[in-house]
Amino acid sequence: MANLEVKIHNLTFKNPVITASGTFGNGVEFDDFIDVNSLGGIVLKGTTLKHREGNNYPRMAETASGMLNAVGLQNKGAEYFCKHIYPAVLRYDTNVIVNVNGSTIEDYIALAEIINDLEAIPAIELNISCPNVKEGGMAFGTSCPMAEQVTKEVRRVYSKTLIVKLSPNVTNIAEIARAVESNGADAVSLVNTFLGMAIDAEKRVPRLSTVTGGLSGPAIKPIALRMVWQVAQAVKVPVIGMGGIMCASDAIEFLLAGASAVQIGTANFVDPQVSVKVIAGIDDYLQRHNFNSVLDIIGGLQM
Amino acid sequence: MNKRVGQLQLIKKIKLNYNNYLLEFKADSILSDIKPGQFVNIQIDRSPSTFLRRPISIYDVNYQTGTISLVVKIVGAGSETLTSAEPGSIIDMVYPLGNGFSQPKAGDKCLLVGGGVGVAPLYLLAKEMNINGIKPFILLGARTAEDHILLSEFNKLGEVFLTTNDGSLQVKGFVTDHEIWSNSLNFNKIYCCGPEPMMKAVAAKAAKLDIDCEVSLENLMACGFGVCLCCVTKTHDGHKCVCTEGPVFNIKDLEWQI
């Protein structure tokens, strides 16, 4: 077996495969299917300071090689998280990362402070890229000054590994990545979903209650890969790549493009065992190509 | 009850009418934990148009031979591909999913109401009722006589009443137009599965007659096991996932305007 260990900031991951927020519940939903401890890390479902009901049904539309979602950060809030979800994930021997959301800077700060006190959570993923909420969310991730400000303010109160999750719905994602890097981000993860839309032509109505939603799945992979490649060249902090990864070879493409780790999202819906298959597939690839360590292929794209 | 990803072999395919098929699969694990009202989530072929799995109710389980049967109605690319599979094909499915119907109490007088392909999960429920000494009344509705499926099977399990929209078989109209509702049969439990307008009409009847009523919902979902949060329905306790907290809900918990 090759050495699959990677480091993001000062945090060690036993392998570069992390499950993406909103596609892996709180991990426990996958206990029947896989050994969650075999993963490099898991990012829990997006959390906000207060309870959110999320958007109305319909929240999902299948599209060519992908899907649109408009869940809208349905979650029970920080207090419920600390009381019920945190104790349930304590038993995991993997990096459990909380995805932190807010409608205002104050919300982000308050939630980050609460999560900072949870000993078993070594990192947060600051979500400035949710396309499905009316206030905040993606607004923070699509403007450099706002991305800078929220990162700077959260950095002030959060002492552990701070990952900032970027939106692809921007003209220049490298610029946003540099903005969060220079304001204290320890790593960036990208991409969140692309803003998209689907129409039921027969009924002449939108397929989502919110009209627009976030596109994910293999349909977005080439664009996500291009963005990861651009960002990896623009920043010094580690990049966590995601967007349409369905198999090990997809994941390896992201690593070659410069990602230090990858996240698997929508594929978890299609195959709840895909994450462990990707780990095995990366190991197999490294052995076939005589690499001792996954570090040997990160950014290893031959030009 | 463990959910699993299974590779099941299609062993029998029966065409029930012009657009419904009965598919029987040999399972690779013990099925004793499957309950009436649960469903499977089937991988079609991951082609661009059938990227996500397709949830399908469990019609029957043979616990001795380890087989699961499903009724599949052709509604689009997914069901088209699935029903074109030939016996011997291996199909990937995640199962068993969902909560299932509640068990009736001994002596309960039960009415099962099914519409179209929605009759499917009621079959296993009726079969289990028979085992527990309950003979349910079964009211089935369809557009035409030809759209009624599996009648001979339901006839073995209880007294069957039929409606057709065009009057081509038994009572003309919707299930709620049947005289069974005006007879004083004193049902104390109704189980219903079919198109949403039908279930809402049945729920309205049940509420008016003050009869406990469960309905099985079918919302669009991506995962089937409670992580995508796409298939929600509104309940008095907020949004609930149809895939895990349902598909079966008691109508008193739903925010239906009935």
Image: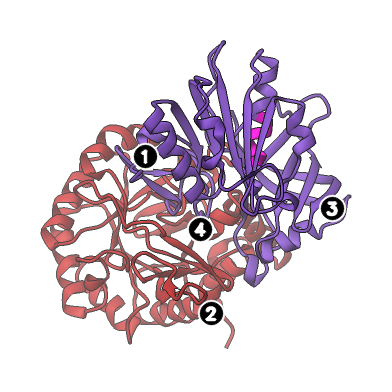
Chain colours: A red, B purple
Looking at the picture, which amino acid does disc 1 mark? Leu
For label 2, the SS is: helix
Q: Where is residue A63, by image quadrant? A: bottom right
User: How much space separates mark 4 and mark 2, taking CA atoms?
Assistant: 20 Å
Q: Residue at x 36, y 50 (%)?
A: A97
Asked if residue B77 is positioned above or below residue B20 in the image, the reply reads below
> In the rendered image, which residue does mark 2 sit on?
A222
Alpha carbon separation for disc pair 2 and 3: 33 Å
User: Which amino acid lies under the numbered mark 3 shown in the image of this protein?
Assistant: Ser
Same chain for marks 1 and 4?
no
Q: Which residues are magenta?
A: B119-124
Q: Which residue is mark 3?
A: B89
Q: Is residue A290 magenta?
A: no
Q: Left of A2 or right of it: where is B90?
A: right
Q: Which residue is mark 1?
A: B254
Residue A291 in the image: state x and y as whole percent: 64, 65
SS class, disc 4: loop
